[in-house]
Amino acid sequence: MRKQYAELFAAFPSPTYATYGNVDMPPLWQEYAGEGTTVLDGERVEIGGRVFGFVGGGLRTPMRTPYEISDEEYAAKIEAVGEVDVLCTHIPPEVPELVYDTVARRFERGSRAVLDAIRRTRPRYSLFGHVHQPLVRRMRIGVTECVNVGHFAATGTPWALEW
C-alpha cells in the first residue's frame, strides 16, 4: 500500500487539490502528500477566482471499505462547504443514472445530501468519482453540470474543467 501511495503522490502536478475516496487511508495521505498538494475534506478553497468545496470519503455499505462514514457525517461536511462554484465530492449525487455501475451491474451509493445541496445552492459544477463505469458520465441537475471525473479509463483522457 505504501508503494502505491508514494507512486500516486509522485505523479501529482503542483498544485494539486485532492480529497479522499472510500478505499483511501487518510493517515497515509498525510505522510505522502508533498509540497504543492493540498488535501481537503469538508473544506473550501479559492482556485483561480472560483470557490471550490471538497468532501471526501464514502458512505457506509456492506463492503466496509476503509473510509466509509455515516450519511449524517457526510451531510455535515457538505453543509460545512456551503455555497460554492464547484462542489468536488467522492460520492455522486443520488441519481440512478449517475450511481449505476454498468460493469458491476449494481447501484453504488449516492448521496442525498449532495443532491440536496446541488438543488439548494446551485453550483456551476458538481465533480465526483466513486462509480467506475457509470451508466451516464454526466448530466445536468437544474443549472449544475454533474460530471463523473473519475471515469476516464475507457478514453484514457481525464476530464478538464474549462471555464
Image (cartoon, rainbow, N blue to C red):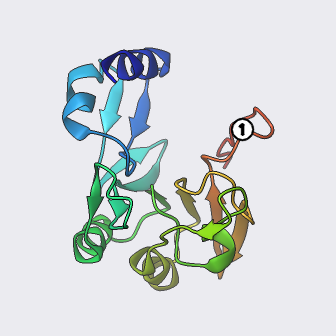
Left or right? Give the position of 80 relative to 11: left
Identity of the residue drawn at 64% across and 78% down? 96
Residue 59 screen position, x and y as percent:
35, 66
Relative to 66, 139 lies left or right:
right
- The location of residue 45, given as percent across then percent down, is 34, 48
- For disc 1, the marked residue is 153
Quarter containing the N terminus = top left
The total number of labels drawn is: 1
Horizontal side of residue 8 vs 143, given as left or right: left
Above or below: residue 115 compared with residue 39: below
State whether residue 48 is above or below residue 106. above
Residue plotted at (40% across, 48% down): 21
Mark 1 neighbour density, 10 Å: few (under 14) some (14–19) many (20 or more): few
Judging depth in this view, the residue of 101 and 6 nearest the camera is 101
Q: Nearer the viewer, residue 112 or 143?
A: 112
**Which residue is at a point 27% across and 31% down the rendered structure image?**
29
Task: Find residue 31 and report its horizontal and vertical position in percent.
Answer: 21, 22
The image quarter containing residue 82 is: bottom left
Q: Residue at x 31, y 19 (%)?
A: 2
Instruction: Using the rendered image of the protein, determine whether residue 158 is visible from the camera's viewpoint.
Output: yes
| Quarter where residue 117 is shown | bottom left
Between 75 and 131, the residue placed more toward the observer is: 131
